[in-house]
Image: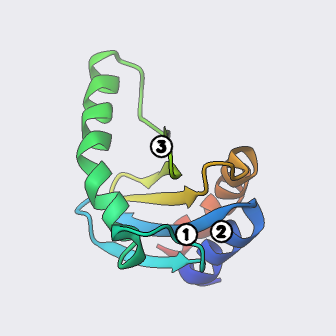
Amino acid sequence: MSFRSILRSIVEECGGGIGAVLMGSDGIAIDEFVAGNVPEGPLEEDLGTAGVEFSRILEEIRKAADALSGGAVSETIVSLARMTLIFRTVDEETFLAVVLEPDGNLGKARYLIRRHLLSIRQEL
């Protein structure tokens, strides 16, 4: 199964999915899928923008987790007025970002991400 088909499955099945992007920790998108309901703004051009903009924050969260001896960060959720972003660590160098509408089904999106995580890892 290709990255794009995995991303498409997550976005289309979760309810309220806008898009998903698989990114390296360097901020370079490996692959992405965007549905037709992207809100106006930078995400219209490139969904990877969300990953790049939040990668610095994710790095700070990792540092805070290390300082607390809490272990590796597996998932971060950012709820904004116009969208919800789910960031899921795939491995040390890769993460998945899924963007939902504000009223999207967060629980189902998280379930689908976990269900497809092994497939994504196998494709890497």
State how far apart marks 3 and 2 are (Cα).
18 Å
Label disc, if present, on residue 19 of the rendered structure = 1
Comes first in the chain, label 2 or label 1: 2
Residue at 72% over, 72% down: 12
Q: Is residue 85 visible?
A: no
| Structural crowding at the residue carrying mark 1, measured as other residues with C-alpha within 10 Å and reported as few (<14), some (14–19) or many (≥20) | many
Q: Quadrant of residue 16?
A: bottom right
Label disc, if present, on residue 7 of the rendered structure = none
Q: Are marks 3 and 2 in contact (CB under 8 Å)?
A: no
Q: Residue 108 versus residue 114: which sits nearer the camera?
A: 108
Q: Position of residue 47 (x, y in %)?
A: 41, 70
Label disc, if present, on residue 11 of the rendered structure = 2
Label disc, if present, on residue 80 of the rendered structure = 3
Q: Residue 112 versus residue 70: which sits nearer the camera?
A: 112
Q: Is residue 17 left or right of residue 96?
A: right
Callout in the foreground (3, 1): 3
Circle 2: residue type: Val
